[in-house]
Image (tube, rainbow, N blue to C red):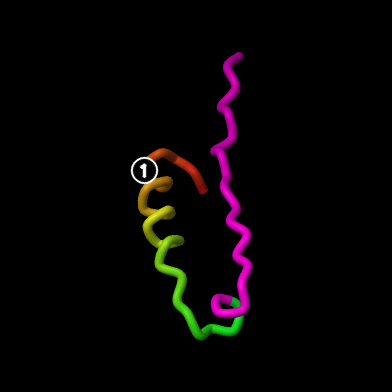
Amino acid sequence: MSQIAPSPTAAVLIIGDEILSGRTRDTNLNTLARFLAPLGVD
């Protein structure tokens, strides 16, 4: 019987006072998500 491998997952650790306080918007996560989604990464 063949087994289906689980989808790979990714996590991002965001650090920095500007990001955590909301003073700066992180635009890289959106780009990263659009790149990884077609590859099947959750």
Instruction: List x then y, in percent, for residue 22.
Output: 53, 83
| Residue drawn where x is 58% and y is 56% of the image | 12
Local crowd at mark 1 within 10 Å, few (<14), some, or many (≥20)? few
Q: Name the residue type under label 1.
A: Pro
Decide: is 2 above or below 41.
above
| Residue drawn where x is 36% and y is 43% of the image | 38
Q: Main secondary structure of the magenta part?
A: loop
Q: Which secondary structure lies at badge 1?
A: helix
When asked about the image quadrant of residue 18, the answer is: bottom right
Q: Is residue 17 magenta?
A: yes
Q: Is residue 30 magenta?
A: no
User: Number of labelled discs?
Assistant: 1
When asked about the image quadrant of residue 16, the answer is: bottom right
Q: What segment is highlighted magenta in the picture?
A: 1-19
| Residue drawn where x is 60% and y is 65% of the image | 14
Residue at mark 1: 38
Using residue 23 as the reference point, say whether residue 37 is left or right of it.
left
Instruction: List x then y, in percent, for residue 29.
Output: 45, 61
Instruction: List x then y, in percent, for residue 35.
Output: 37, 48
Q: Specify the quadrant that holds the N terminus.
A: top right
Which of the pair 7/18 is nearer the observer? 18
Decide: is 26 above or below 2.
below
Which of the pair 3/15 is nearer the observer? 15
